[in-house]
Image: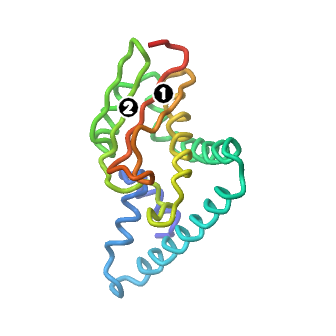
Amino acid sequence: MKRDEFFRTMCTMGFCSFASMGLLAEGAEQGTNPELDELKWKLDFVRKRFAKLVGILNVNLDENTKNKVFESLGKECARMFLDITGPYKGKPKEFLEEIKKRWAKETTYDEATGSIRVVDKSEHCTCALVDEKLMPPAFCHCTLGWQKETYSMILGQPVEAILEESILRGGKRCVFRIQATNTHA
């Protein structure tokens, strides 16, 4: 199986949070599977290099530009998963039930106010590109972009995403609040 097929298969099987791929690579015993060892080495390398890039952007860009770049990256990432999220367009309750099976510990949805709250299960950043020891907290704007793109599509209207708690910012988990902007609470 080629690497790109491997990652697509893992995503289809519900490992889309990417954390699972990282844990899979980290959990592999050294020397037992050369292909898996190589993937682990490459993932570690990519995480370190990407953290360096984010750090450089963090230092060299003004706050608004930096946040816009990271949010745009998150939105692009969300578009890569339309085959998974797309079927839930107009079905926020069903989507929240599905993510509780996959990566969310708890979810709430207030249809009247257009407010959604999601608490992740993982005690680690779910992005496969993140090494928590190296990644600047500013990178959390990437996941805010993912949340905005995904929930705007699902709700059929623009949303704002707020990070209530974040692992990269010292929290024990990631907690998001999504608010439809065309609905006033």
Tell me if residue 171 comes above or below residue 35 in the rendering. Answer: above
Quadrant in which residue 72 is drawn:
top right
Say the numbered circle drawn on residue 78.
none
Label 1's element?
helix
Q: Which residue is mark 2?
A: 95
Q: Is residue 37 left or right of residue 158?
A: left
Q: Secondary structure at mark 2?
A: helix
- How far apart marks 1 and 2 lie (CA) works out to 8 Å
- Total residue callouts: 2
Image location of residue 90, percent across then percent down: 46, 22
Residue 116 coordinates in the image, percent (x, y):
39, 27
Q: Position of residue 101 (x, y in %)?
A: 28, 42
- Image: 44 above or below 32: above
Q: Is residue 183 above or below residue 155?
A: above
Q: Decide: marks 1, 2 in contact (CB < 8 A)?
A: yes
Which residue lies at the image location 36% right of the left edge and 59% below the top edge?
Answer: 20
| Residue at x 42%, y 84% (from the top left corner) | 34
| Residue 154: numbered disc | 1
Amino acid bearing label 1:
Ile
Which class describes the residues within 10 Å of circle 1: few (<14), some (14-19), or many (20+)?
many
Three-letter code, disc 2: Phe
Residue 52: x and y, percent?
A: 61, 67
- What residue is at 63 percent from the left and 44 percent from the top? 67
